[in-house]
Image (cartoon, grey):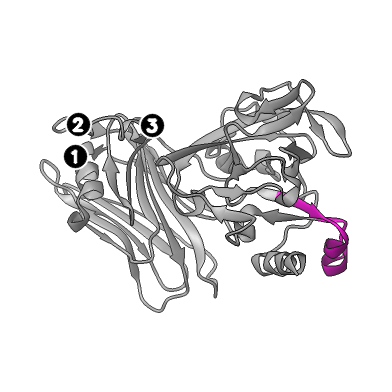
Amino acid sequence: MGWIGLADGEGQRFDVRGLQAAGDSTPTQPPANALLPCGTILVETRLSPDVRPRALLEFAYDQPFSGGFSLQALPGGAVILVDSQDGGVRHATLRRDPDTRADVARISYSWDAPRRYARLVVERPEANSVSIVEMAEPTPMLLADLCRMIRRESTRNCDPGNSFVAVSDRMEPVGPMPGLASRLPVDSARGTCEARRLRRGDTVKCPGEGLVPVLQPVRRTVPARGSFRPVLLRAPYFGLSRDILVAPQQRMVMCGAQVEYLFGHEAVLVAAGHLVNGVSARRATGGPDLITYHQVVLPGHETLTVAGCALESLYIGRLRRRREDLAASVLAGAPRPDLPEHPKPVWPVLKPFEAITLAAHRAA
């Protein structure tokens, strides 16, 4: 099913049928004492080198279990999870390099009680980094506890810097993230093809490369909030023939005399989120709680043409060499020998301040 709970500044929603059904009718209450044997709790926040601990998310369990759940960020960069039920305590510490910047971080706790496996993950999308620590012997959670935590703000203690808290009924993937909305037109051998319809073995038209085979299509459904909230890129800017929706981390290939002058390269990659200026690019508002993003893995990290604009295909680096990270990603089910290795992005990736500089020169 997927995402069943979401709490943010826009409200609180929980439905055991899934958030896609939450707007259709009265939300369905979880059955009494029903357990969630497998799931994910996701918190998006900003991690900064504070001199004090921060409670990112805390809530207590109700009967028949006693105890509670706690997720904290500590000075020095560590993230600590404590899950206590009926006297049993499970905890994990994930240490990361302290940073002087307050970067966006997605912190997730995923568990699969039947498999006796869980993981605590910190993703920093702006730095393209993922840190994972594995846990053993997780316990299921009561759906009623999670429902109460999401729907009733008074039952949870959250850091004011959090963007949102979400709950899924499955272990959600982490790592490389697709970034194309479902219906975006991608140039392929059979004409334009919607991103959601691309399949393994299809060929896509790549500028300067001709036809390139799709090794693996990927998709992921996420809450349309925080760092997942789509960016609307508007035509005729960026060479677009129509407006398109992409994920903030979806990178665009930008070239021209200004690029060569400023950065000394023929082309550069710029994340859509760094281009938001309220005119040519802006954050999408109003839409549903969830959005599904698509992408394709190509042999050499080639460029796609989407509605006339050059966009990056999915960059996976040397993911196939890292079994733990691969198993936790959207490519977990893909044949490992068939996955390529991308030593480095095909073009230099601009940092946020560099993207702002480029945008300012283009607007001048």
Asked if one can make out residue 129 in the rendered structure from this viewpoint, the answer is no
Instruction: Report the amino acid beneath label 3.
Output: Arg
Under tag 1, what secondary structure? helix
Foreground tag (1 vs 3): 1
* Tag of residue 115: 3
Which mark sits nearer the N-terminus, 2 or 3?
2
Residue beneath the point at 56% across and 41% down: 324
Task: Count neighbours of disc 3 (C-alpha within 10 A) and say few if under 14, some if 14 to 19, many if 20 or more.
Answer: few
* Marks 2 & 1, CB-CB < 8 Å contact: yes
The answer to whether marks 1 and 3 mark residues whose Cβ atoms lie closer than 8 Å is no
Q: Quadrant of the C terminus?
A: bottom right
Give the residue pinned by disc 1: 144
Instruction: Say if residue 143 shows up in the picture.
Output: yes
Q: Nearer the viewer, residue 168 or 236?
A: 236
Q: Residue at x 14, y 43 (%)?
A: 65
N-term-proximal mark, 2 vs 1:
2
Q: Residue 103, relative to residue 330: is it above or below?
A: below
- Looking at the picture, how far across and down is residue 170, in whole percent? 39, 34
Which amino acid lies under the numbered mark 1 shown in the image of this protein?
A: Ala
Task: Give the residue at x 69% y 23%.
Answer: 200
Give the Cα separation between the discs numbered 1 and 3.
Answer: 22 Å
- Amino acid type of the residue that numbered disc 2 sits on in the rendered structure: Ala
Question: Which stretch appears magenta?
Answer: 252-267
Q: Is residue 60 left or right of residue 110?
A: left
Q: How many marks?
A: 3
Residue beneath label 2, please? 34
Distance between the alpha carbons at the discs numbered 2 and 1? 7 Å
Mark 2 secondary-structure assignment: loop
Q: Position of residue 18 (x, y in %)?
A: 33, 32
Residue mark closest to the camera, 2 vs 3: 2
